Amino acid sequence: MVKLMVQQTTKAPIRDYVCLVKGCARRKALAEGKQVHALIIHSKLDSNIFLANNLIDMYSKCGSVSDAHKVFSAMPQRNVFSWTAIISGYADSGQGVEAINLFQQMQETGIPPDKVAFVVVLKVCARITALEQGKQLHSDIIKSSFESDLIVANTLVDMYAKCGCTEDARELFNNMKERDVVSWNVMIAGYAQNGLGKEALALYEQMQREGVQPSRVTFVVLLKACASIAALEQGKQLHSDIIKRGFGLDVIVRSTLVDMYAKCGCLEDARELFNNMSERNVVLWTLMIAGYAQNGLCKEALALYEQMQQEAVLPNNVTFAVLLKACASIAALEQGKQLHLHIIKRGFESDVIVRSTLVDMYAKCGCTKYARELFNNMSERDVVSWNVMIAGYAQNGLVKEALALHEQMKQEGVQPDDVTFVVLLKACASIAALEQGKQLRSDIIKRGLEWDLIVANTLVDMYSKCGCTVDARELFNNMIERDVVSWNVMIAGYAQNGLGKEALALYEQMKQEGLQPNNVTYICVLSACSHSGLIDKGLHLFDSMCKDLGVTPTLEHYACMVDLLGRAGCLADAEDFIIRLPIQPDSVIWRTLLGAARNYGHVEIGRRAFDCVMKLEPENASDYVLLSNIYAAAGRMDEVAKIRKEMKDIGVKKVPGCSWIEVDKQVHTFVGGDASHPQSKKIFAELDRLVGLMKEAGYTPDLSFVLDDMEDEEKEIALCKHSEKLAIAFGLISTPSGTPIRIKKNLHMCGDCHNATKIISKIMGRDISVMDANRFHHFKNGVCSCGDYW
């Protein structure tokens, strides 16, 4: 019809043009729509307000808001429908702010909005969480007497709920003179979207009591609420209601049921539903794959993808994102590479979500170089993409690279969000980079995120892990909002710094303020007792936790108890405790006993603990090193040689000691025996000078910490090159006299380095803090804060 009219330049009645324009809008036929527009202009009907309104609607629905605006701007007269059409166009294209501005312009011109205009702009406010504008609209709606209109009232409830104001939404809902099933669905969804799953389910109960028939949407929303809070029993009851109401065969409801069962950990029920579905689309396959991945069954997720391919179901971008996350979680690099090929074949490589997940997968599989190459080649990078790459560096211990990328991010005008700062703060904490952490805090304040709960918790953690418990506590005290994580982080901070009494006092304060401690709280408090030698307090707390508070101990709690007894030298009691455990001990528990045996030189218990660890985790190099240390301390070098040979035969390599020190906001890394630092000559000269001074002060190298078969003189040189000693020497030559030195080490600090650092702190008059794999050691004037109890 359009082609014919163009060829004949036929003039038609207005009603025919309206039909054609609406047809183009329905089919999203932009090219034909423009041809019709040209015919309208040729017919000199472009000033007709009715036709112009339909043209605005057509261009908007075809995705060309700029053309819609041209028509709107050229109109000699506009009515409420003209304004509503252009506002809807901007709203549907995701330009919410522009839509709100146009609505305000309409009001300024004196044209009163109708209920359709109010509904459109309320939906915009809901989508972009523009609460203040939403409240102003509410006031205008009351003045216009539209508040009692059912559709307007439902949209108001939805706006308040999506802006996080569930109490206001509920008040509106309760005061509605008329409510339909949509009203109930909107309020139930509002609760569910705000994490109030219990309230959503309670409202469903009220809905049933009032005799309102639930719809398919009701059940979909409720099942998602159950999934979010793992409410399996309520989910099963809903399943029963779904069958009774005749929605059991509905594809969307059934897919949401699969998702609910999977997220509640019932994968057998989810798979049974999945298998019995006659129609399985890509969404359903993706949900089932995600169910396996979310429950840690990543191999099963990948196997289901193979079946999906065999059944010729084409994956979408979400499918690939889920599968890549599964590969990342188990470091399945080869499967990840295979997926990458499939992504290229399916044309999803340029998809921002897929590309970001690819970067994440390669980074988590240790391929940061290739991850960065992918990141650099992205045509479009949002804040999520930057966060993924920054996190990839941080997770692989490349903190300098993570911080440098953050600087590049700012230079390119991308604003960091709360996730960016959380990742970077954790990276700083991992290497005790205090100055960098302080700079990040300054950036956080500028961005107005200082009192974001997760960011604030991470700041407290960063200060604690950098040994600044006073600063951490000040931040903690000033927090506007605190959750159980906040308390746990501060208690753990005290524990890591050997401040057991402060940790216990904070635990008591937590209970006094009415907060319920969780499993992690007890792990933190028990760890504090262990690191501070508060054995009686720890035993009492554990006993009370089990008997009085009804907490079922986990493997982590049992490991804390073994550590508590082991550090106190009660090795036989610790071993007996493990033997009597009601659950199978893991490698961590036996390794904890092995470490205690190393500290106290108990060969027999050490050997038994080692044998038990080997049955559970035979390829961890640290266990061989601990047993070697025990034998070396006992002078049984033949056994040391056997262990070294066994390590070589099975290919187990010792993790090299690595230490970090921050000087002038630059992080320097030292590996044991490494001479690659630009100032190595000065560092080794300083070490030679220090050793001489230390020996004059009574230092004798403990050669039992060198396991290599070499002469004593060579062993002494090897001890001198331990990573923390290199970092301390660098700190001494790079900072003014009297400046505190702060170091992070990846492994447990050896006894020789511990003794040496005590002496260095005294002869050099420096406060030296070393955060090793277990705790903080604060050395001052020849004394360590751990009291040699570590």
Image (tube, rainbow, N blue to C red):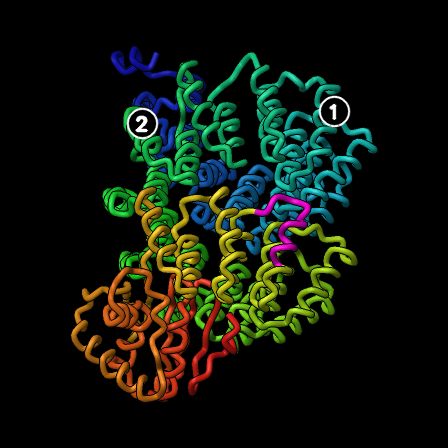
- Residue 612 at what x, y percent from top left? 52, 47
Position of residue 346 relative to residue 619, above or below, is above
The answer to which quarter of the image holds residue 240 is: top right
Question: Which residue is at the front of the view, 648 or 333?
Answer: 648
Q: Which residue is mark 1?
A: 241
Q: Is residue 575 part of the magenta span, yes or no?
A: yes
Q: Which secondary structure, mark 2?
A: helix
Q: Residues within 10 Å of mark 1 (few under 14, many from 20)?
A: some
| Magenta-tinted stretch | 574-585
- The local secondary structure at tag 1 comes to helix
Where residue 520 appears, as percent x and y from the top left, is 61, 57
Residue 248 lies within the magenta run = no
- Which of the 4 image quadrants contains residue 65? top left
On screen, residue 205 above or below 638: above
The label number, if any, that marks residue 344 in the structure image: none
At x 49%, y 23%, the residue is: 285
Look at mark 2 in the image and give the residue it sits on. 41
